[in-house]
Image (tube, rainbow, N blue to C red):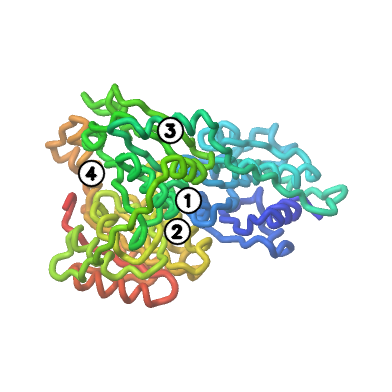
Amino acid sequence: MNGAESLLSTLGANGVNVWFSNPGTSEMHAVAALDAVSDVRGILCLFEGVATGAADGYARVTGGPAATLLHLGPGLGNGHANLHNARRARVPVINIVGDHATYHSRYDAPLDSDIASIARGASAWYRRSARPDDLPGDVAAAVAASYGPPGQVATLVLPADVSWGELSSPPAHWPLADRRRPSVPADEHLDAGLAALRSPRAALFLGGAAVSAEGLALATRVAAAVNARVITETFPTLQDHGAGVEAPERLIYLSEFAISQLKDVDTLVLLGAAEPVGFFGYPDIPSRLVHSGCRVVNVAPPGSDVIGALEFLAAALDAPEVAVATGERPQKPHGDLTTAALAQAVGATMPEDVIVVDESNTAGVHLFGATRFAPPHQWMTLTGGAIGYGLPAALGAAIGGGGRRVLAFEADGSMMYTPQALWSMAREGVDVTVVGLSNRSYAILNLELQRVGATAEGAQSRRMLDLDDPTLDLSGLSRAFGVPATRATTADDFTEALERSFATPGPSFIEAVLPKGLS
């Protein structure tokens, strides 16, 4: 048995059954090992950013890691943006990065690079296997590291000769990773949180497991007991949403509005989330979003038992049961296709148990509110802020979602980063509805241009933010990658296209033609 076969066997034994791959010469024995090890499913991705983003999406819906197979340092570098998103989302991802044979590295071949330095930006754990016999233990260690808690990116470098080399003695049993349980918050932190919530003008700030249906219900009860507010992160990793699920206020993305939203909060209790700060620094706007007199109490950091902490608080406060708000889902819209009409159509037609992958940016401003009373579903967002996440994450979520429909909202500018994911969707036949949001503009950057105090009155600067010279043909691009596509220019067209897609197995693409820019 060679090293590559032992690698896949150890992954499979540890429940890592999906390998999003973009291999090269150094990884050919790893590719061949897929024929010998049936426990691992290889999925070809045409760009490394698709592989890493798909692993992120898979991990978010399953709670366990997918593996990636990347080619040398440049391949790891190409996948870095979506590894950054996975790191910020605190989900488990395992990178297997092929490298030159150990004896070849000293010759400084053209593709030789400092893989360790490239990995350092997103990986919490890094190791380079030295011998085939080391691989099973190294793989198990990578799996264990990826789980954290909290989840994190682990990178294992696989030299080519370690991959093709034979094990001297294959183990009788493949090593299994130690998986640590989330830590229980210390008593003093729980007591501090309890005291803080009894203070006037307190709020709970939620992330991680606290935005599951169970966590949201517990947080709402706790808040009701002490007359506190409940606020969730702006871009949660995976949030339960829809009818029957509590829907507290969400922190506003724009710093100046978030500061106003939090101005009356004198005590902020963190549960599964870090203290909120602005996404960027702006002239004359504070980076911290809470006011200077606000006390921030971190009760349950990411990676700890957030649900257990909420259960403790609810029991200590004898928190009452709270009835979940009820309401009607929107009616199907008619007429012009605006961002509001688009959101209304989604809220009116969405089936139950959908996984939403949201990279809608400015065009999706109404989506979360419009789906408040749609059938229960889950919502994934661009947690790390590095665009080009939506299509790959939708691919991964569909692979890991157990047959659930994925609904992906993709802004036209962001779509250009990783459109290759459409090809993998077509090849794997996954049930994904992609809504390409065509407003022919980097609208978010037009907004940010104003917020940072820059001016863009000339043709040259405006040309850097427009996408209509030439206009992108999103539906044509989708068809070129093998995904059936349609183009909707009215609210009626869009609603019909959604309903047709939800009823049709496999991937489909709807190009929603919106007014240009912010609308």
- Left or right of 469 in this view: 350: right
Q: Residue at x 34, y 50 (%)?
A: 414
Report helix, strand or loop for mark 1. helix
Q: Which residue is drawn at 38% across and 28% down?
A: 296
Q: Toward which corner of the image does residue 126 lie, by quadrant?
A: top right
Q: Which mark is first along the chain, 4 or 3? A: 3
Q: Please state the horizontal and vertical placement of residue 440, each as a whole percent of the image.
A: 22, 54
What is the C-alpha distance between the residues marked 1 and 3? 35 Å
Quadrant holding the N terminus: bottom right
Disc 2 vs disc 1: which is toward the camera?
Answer: 1
What is the C-alpha distance between the residues marked 4 and 2? 24 Å
What is the C-alpha distance between the residues marked 4 and 1? 25 Å
Residue for badge 3: 193
What is the C-alpha distance between the residues marked 2 and 3? 44 Å
Q: Which residue is drawn at 22% across and 47% down?
A: 443
Q: What residue type is labelled 3?
A: Gly
From this view, report whether residue 217 is shown above or below residue 310: below
Residue for badge 4: 465
Please give the label number shown on residue 53.
1
What is the C-alpha distance between the residues marked 2 and 1? 9 Å
Q: Do the residues labelled 1 and 3 touch (CB within 8 Å)?
A: no
Q: What residue type is labelled 2?
A: Ala
Q: Which mark is first along the chain, 3 or 1? A: 1
Residue for badge 2: 421
Q: Please state the horizontal and vertical placement of residue 265, each as a whole percent of the image.
A: 28, 32
User: In the depicted view, which residue is nearer to us: 25 or 208?
Assistant: 208
Q: Toward which corner of the image does residue 461 lie, by quadrant?
A: top left
Q: Which mark is first along the chain, 1 or 2? A: 1
Q: Characterize the local packing of mark 2: few (<14), some (14-19) or many (20 or more) Cα atoms within 10 angstroms.
A: many
Q: Please state the horizontal and vertical placement of residue 217, each as a whole percent of the image.
A: 40, 52
Q: Which mark is first along the chain, 1 or 4? A: 1
Q: Are marks 2 and 1 in contact (CB under 8 Å)?
A: yes
